[in-house]
Image: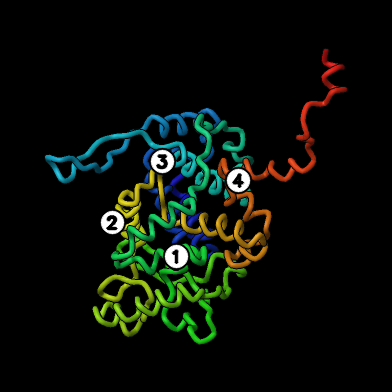
Amino acid sequence: MINELLDRWLASEVEPMVREVTYLDYKRRADAYIRPVIGKLKLKNLTLAKAEDFRNELLRRKVKVRTSSKRKRRSQATRQLSETTVNGALKVLSMALNYARRHKFVATNVLHDLKRRQSDAAEPKKRALTAAELAAFMEAARSNYWYSFFALLASTGLRPSEVLAHSWEHVDFDAGWIHVERKLTLLPGGLYQFDPPKTQSSKRKVPISPGLEQILLEHLSRQEELRAYDENLELVFCGLDGQPADSRNILNRHLKPIAAKAGIRGSVTLYSFRHTFMILSTNDMGAPKLTSRVMAHKDVAFSQNVYEDPDDEALRRSTLPMDAFLDDSGDDEEGATAAD
């Protein structure tokens, strides 16, 4: 049965080979979307037609979501599964079937011939703040407890999970460096763990500017004043109890209200600061390789392809140097004669 395949694949190939958070994500998708629909189906009976039925069933499925209203603090509504969710479930099933094919439980992976529904909407570009928006945001955030957290994200382009894992021993004020050695991973049930950074190159040091140094020192003083730390963890950014912070709470309770106060329209996330750093720092320095190094990307091309999204003004500036080659001395008599 499909259930037995999922059990074997998760236990034998996934759990020993990937990080715990990845294993839990694959298991969650299998439990939530695959097992209830085709879990009891015999593996040999999974044909392309059955796979199509499974895909279509997921596309039609509706789930309950929590919403809020003025009368009730929490209410429930229904919506269809997103295409991203459906494709994620199909991906997990396909990986399990590839495992079955390698072990010769099946001859082929029928999902290889299954058409996936493509979204009609274009993939949204990464949201970066303009220089004016960033200045407005930081001004609006000045009295917020997480002001120094936002300042560090904007000044270094570090990933939020990296910043939330920093302890004070990772901050070298004397030499002016922050050492990135781990990231915070949140697990189900309110648990957490510290993992190595995303890639080997993500283990790095990033410079602390004089302005950022002053902000971090003020944050340290306030943290000690409020006793908002745990002596065993010594986290730079944490909850008032000293325990690791949930980035989702920071996003919803602090970042979004601050962005609204600053008059910033559109979706803004914690990763927006990373995109903003890439664009503004590169434009100012004129050295994308340096910016890419700070962000721990494998190459400059990746940084530019993923993060750089020139605005209208930048596009206009790109044509200005060509004016030097244009003759604006007046009417060209020969040209005028030819046109006549």
Give the spatial CA distance, label 2 vs label 4.
33 Å
Lateral position of residue 117 relative to residue 282, left or right: left
Image position, residue 264 (x, y; %): 38, 47
Foreground mark, 3 or 1? 1
Of the pair 231 and 280, the residue shown nearer to us: 280
Foreground mark, 4 or 3? 4
Q: Are marks 2 and 4 in contact (CB under 8 Å)?
A: no
Q: Earlier in the sequence, mark 3 or mark 1?
A: 3
Q: Earlier in the sequence, mark 2 or mark 4?
A: 2
Is residue 183 something that shows in the picture? yes
Please give the label number shown on residue 40. Answer: 3
Neighbours of disc 2 within 10 Å: few (<14), some (14-19), many (20+): few
Give the spatial CA distance, label 4 vs label 1.
31 Å
Give the spatial CA distance, label 4 vs label 3.
57 Å
Residue that protrudes farthest toward the bottom in the picture = 174
Number of marks drawn: 4
Q: Are marks 4 and 1 in contact (CB under 8 Å)?
A: no
Image position, residue 198 (x, y; %): 54, 65
Is residue 105 something that shows in the picture? no
Tag 4: amino acid: Ala
Q: Is residue 80 above or below residue 249?
A: above
Tag 1: amino acid: Ser
Q: Earlier in the sequence, mark 4 or mark 1?
A: 1
Please give the label number shown on residue 253. Answer: 2
Q: Earlier in the sequence, mark 1 or mark 2?
A: 1
Q: Earlier in the sequence, mark 3 or mark 2?
A: 3
Rendered residue at 28%/34% (across/down): 78
Tag 2: amino acid: Arg
- Give the residue at mark 4: 314
Neighbours of disc 4 within 10 Å: few (<14), some (14-19), many (20+): few
- Give the residue at mark 1: 161
